[in-house]
Structure formats: C-alpha cells, structure tokens
Image (cartoon, rainbow, N blue to C red):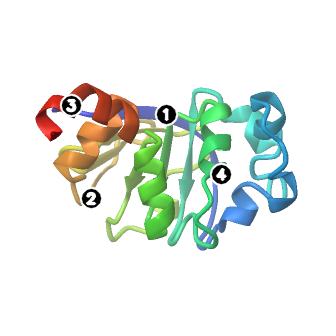
Amino acid sequence: MAYVKRARIAGVLGDHVNTDVIYPARYLVLFEPEEVKRHLFEDIDPALAPRLAGAGVLGGEDFGCGSAREQGLTALQYAGTELVVCKSFSRAFYRNGVNNGVPLFIADCPQPLEEIGGVGDELEADFETGLLTNRTTGRAFACTPTQEFVIRVLQAGGIFPYYNQNKKELS
C-alpha cells in the first residue's frame, strides 16, 4: 500500500491561506484549464502558478480555510501540482482534496515550517509511514501516517475512480 510522493518546492506559504487566496472568487466563471491555472495564488505570488508544474507547495496551519468550494483544488491539478505539504488543512479542503485525488500531506511534526524546507528543496512524503524527508538537506520529520482508506482513494486518483474500481466490494 505504499504511497510516496516527491516534489521540488515551488512556493512556501504561511498560515491560514484561504480558498479566496488559493483561487480568487472573481475567476469562478472560468472553466478552461489554461485560464484557471493562471490565476492560482495570483493575489499572493503571481509568479507561483507557472512554477507548480511537476512541483509542490509547502504551507503552514489551516491551509484551505474559508469556503468549501473545490476550484482551488482544481486549479492546483490544472497547474500540475505534484504535492501539497502543510502543517494542517481545513477539514473541507482536505476532504475535497482526497475526493479529487490531490496529494495533501499533513506535516504535523513539531518543527517549524522554515526547518522543514524552502523554495527549491525536494521533499518526499511517505503517506503510509508519515515520514517527510527533505532530500535536499537530508533531514527527516516524523508526521502522523495517513489513514489507509485515504491512501487507497489517493492511489485510485480520487473518490469516483476508487468507487468505480471497488463497486462490487462496496455493494
């Protein structure tokens, strides 16, 4: 059941990054992936979205607070984000992320964010064991392992693919 994700960190964000900052509400009328991903994190770092392809984000406490809408997660997917590592996520954002197959890793270790990593560092998150490793610095951080069911949903690519793969067992 191993589920390990690795990504170079394109941006380090602080605490309480809300959904309106992740994807501003004024763009909710947009649906084309190229248009949507351009506005990701626009109000805090307009240069961040293009750097997210194949990369990741490191954030603080309560990432995704605010509304429960999913456009921020969709924008992260459209941008090609490989991994989002934060000290904690809002409950709705985390659940929506799992449902959509976005790898959100909870870095609930006691070390402060700046000790975990910075822009350009390569992080490796082992969801099963909870081990977060900064492959650039060689430091490892013990975090809480992700629940087995959540890992299975992420491995499937989200809740709908998971259901389609397991509907006989779930009936």
Can you identify the residue that label 4 sits on?
72
Residue 60, position as x, y percentages in the image: 53, 66
Q: 5 or 137: nearer the eye?
A: 5
Can you identify the residue that label 2 sits on?
143
Residue type at mark 3 is Asn
Q: Is residue 108 visible?
A: yes
Q: Is residue 84 left or right of residue 74?
A: left
Q: Between marks 4 and 1, how big is the CA–CA gap?
A: 19 Å
Q: 109 or 99: nearer the eye?
A: 99
Q: Which residue is depicted at the point 42% across and 57% down?
A: 95
Nearest to N terminus: mark 2 or mark 3 = 2
- Closer to us: mark 3 or mark 1? 3
Nearest to N terminus: mark 4 or mark 2 = 4
- Residue 7 tag number: 1
Residue type at mark 2 is Cys
Q: Are marks 4 and 2 in contact (CB under 8 Å)?
A: no
- Closer to us: mark 3 or mark 4? 3
Q: Secondary structure at mark 3?
A: helix
Can you identify the residue that label 3 sits on?
166
Nearest to N terminus: mark 2 or mark 1 = 1
Q: Between marks 3 and 1, how big is the CA–CA gap?
A: 29 Å
- Residue 44 tag number: none
Q: Secondary structure at mark 1?
A: strand
Residue 110, position as x, y percentages in the image: 33, 71
Nearest to N terminus: mark 3 or mark 1 = 1
Q: Quadrant of the C terminus?
A: top left
